[in-house]
Image (cartoon, rainbow, N blue to C red):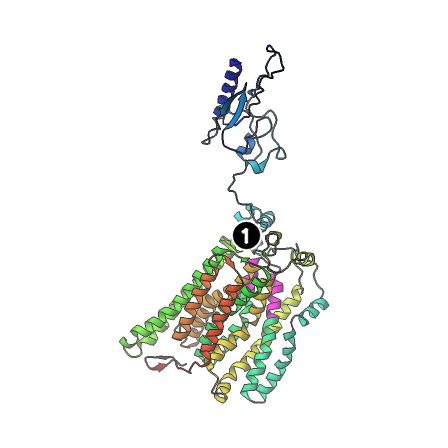
Amino acid sequence: MSDHNSTSTNATKNNNNYGFNMHQSVIAEDDDEPPGSPQPQPSLPTRQPRRRNTSPSLPMKARMQAPGLIRQPPSRQGSMHSVDGNSMMVRPPRRTSLPPPHLVVEPSEKASPQEVDIEAAAPANTTPASPQAVDYAAKHPRGNFTSKLGRITALFTPVKPLGPTPTYRQSAIAAIRYTPLNICLLFIPVSWALHFTHQSDTLIFVFSALGIIPLAALLGLGTEQIALRTSSSVGGLLNATLGNVVEMIIAGIALKRCELELVQSSLLGGLLSNLLLVLGMAFLVGGYRFHQQEFQPLVAQLNSSLMTVAVISLIVPAAFHGYLGDRLPQGEEVTILLELSRGSAIILILIYIAYLFFQFYSHNHLFLDTLQSSPSSINNSTSSLPIDPTQSSETITSHEYAELNTPTAIFLLVASTALAYETAENLVSSLEGLVAANPSISKEWLTLIIIPIISNAAEHTTAVVVASKGKFDLAMSVAVGSCIQIALFVIPLLVLVAWGMGRPLTLLFDEVETLVLFFSVILVKFSVEDGKSHWMSGVVLVAVYIIIALSFWNFPLTERLVQGQHLSC
C-alpha cells in the first residue's frame, strides 16, 4: 500500500509540473475483498509525439484542455482524496505560467471546436460583445477598414437592409399623410398674396411662419428617407445639414439685407433650440419609451468639447470688447474685432473639416447606431412601457421600410427648399413692421426663440421620431450634430461670406446671449458625459429652455455698439 501511495503522490507532482490539474481516481481497499487482491493503479497520460494544433480560433488554454487531457475543475482550491482511509491534500496547480514546450502532452487527436468548452476556457472577466457589434463585424470584416475603398463603402452601407421600394403613388401618399401639419401648406399662397399686396406685416409674419413649419417637416422626411440608405454617421450629417437649410436661408436673407443682429440672434437661437429643446424632447420621448437610453460616451464627450471650443470663440471677442474696448484708439477696435473674427472663422472651419474626417474615416466605427430596442434591452427591462408580443415584433425588426423612393425624396427636398426660401424672405421682410406695430413684443424674443423653433421643426421632428424608435445615437447626431455644424461651419462661413460682401459681421454676439449659451453647453455636457440618459434629463433641458424664453420676452431692444459706433454696412 505504501507503493500505491508513493505512485499516487508522484503522479500528482508530475501533473503539477505539467501545469494540469488531473483528478486522481484512487480506489481505497474494500473491507469485503481479500487482502491479496490487486489494487487498481492510476493511469498516467502516455507521452505522445508533439503535434501542433492548427485551430486559430481556440485560445491556448482551450487547446490544452482538449480531449485526451483531464479537465481542470472550476475550483482552484486543493481537494481532499481518501487513500486507504487516510486523507491526502492534492496541491492545486501553479497559476504562474504554461509548461515548457518540450513537456507539453498533446492529445492523440486534434480537438474540434465542438468538443472544447470555450466558456470554461475563456477568461472570467471577458465582456461579451453587443449584438450591434456582432452584426457590424459580420457586415464589415476587419480587413475592410484597412482599405480606402472599404471605408468609403461602409459610409453608404445602411445599418439594416431595406425592404421593398415603394412606388411613386405610395411615396406621394406617404408624403401627403406624413404629418397633420401639412394642412398648413395652404398658408403659403396666403402669405405670398399678403406680401405682394402689401398687407399687414403681422399677418404676413404669422402666415409665413405657419407655412414654413410643414416645409421644415417635409425637409426632415426627405432627409430621413435618404439617410436610411446610408450609414448612421452619414445619415446624421445629412439630417443635421438639411435640417439647417431653413436656418441658413433666413440668416442668408438677413445678411443680404444687412440685418447683422438678426443673423447673430437667429443662429445663436438655433444653437439654444437644438441643445435644450430638441435634445430635451428627444430625451423625454425616448425616456418615456425606454427606461434608459445609451449612446457612445466617447462621441458625446467629443461633441461637448467641440461645443466648448465654439463657445470660447464667442467669449473671447466679448471679453476683448469688454476689457480693452475703452483702451484702444477710436475706430481701432472694429478693425481688431474683424481680424479676430475672420481668423477664428478659418480655424473653426478647419476644426469642422477635421471632425468630418474623424467621423467618416479614421474613427467611423464609433458612430454606429446603438439600437435601444434590441432583444437584450427588452430582456433587461429597459423599456418603461409594458411589452406585449405585438409591440416586440414591431419594434425588433431586421429590415428598415422606406416610405419614399429615392427620386421622390430628392424631389421633395428640392421643392421644399425652394418654397422655404421664398416664404422665409417674406417672413424676414415683415419682422420690422411687426415689432413697430406691436411694441410689447421684443424683437430679440422673436429672433432668438420663435424663428429658431420654426426653422428647427425638421430637426425637432426627426430627433423625436428616431429617439422613440430607439436610435438614440442618430437622435444625438441630429440634435448635437446640428449645433456643431452651426457653431463650427455655418457661423464661420457667414463671417467669411460677409467679408467678401463687405459686411462687418463679427463673432461679437450679445453678452447675455453668449453667457446663456455657455451655461447651456455646460448643462448638456453634464447630461451626456456618461453615455446614458433618461426622461428626467429631458425635463431639465426643456425647463431651462422655457426659463430662457421667458427671460427674453421682456428683453429690451439694444444696439450693439463698438466704441460708440453701430456696425452697419
Residue 293 makes an appearance in the image: yes
Residue 352 makes an appearance in the image: no
Q: Residue 436 in the image: x percent, y percent?
A: 48, 88
Give the answer, above or below, for where 168 lies relative to 333.
above
Magenta stretch containing residue 226, yes or no? yes
Give the answer, above or below, for where 334 lies relative to 55.
below
**Residue visible at 59% across and 26% down in the picture:** 68
As rendered, which of 95 and 520 lies closer to the eye? 95
The residue labelled by disc 1 is 151
Q: Is residue 358 left or right of residue 344?
A: right
**Residue visible at 48% across and 78% down in the picture:** 447
As rendered, which of 300 and 247 lies closer to the eye? 300
Q: Name which quarter of the figure residue 499 lies in.
A: bottom left
Q: Is residue 446 left or right of residue 166?
A: left
Q: Residue 295 in the image: x percent, y percent?
A: 53, 57
Q: Residue furthest front?
A: 31
In the rendered structure, which amino acid carries the disc numbered 1? Arg
Q: Residue furthest top?
A: 36
Magenta residue span: 218-238
Q: Residue 20 in the image: x percent, y percent?
A: 52, 27
Q: Quadrant of the C terminus?
A: bottom left
Give the main secondary structure of the magenta stretch: helix
Q: Name which quarter of the figure residue 260 lies in.
A: bottom left
Q: Residue 259 in the image: x percent, y percent?
A: 45, 80
As rendered, which of 429 and 411 lies closer to the eye? 429
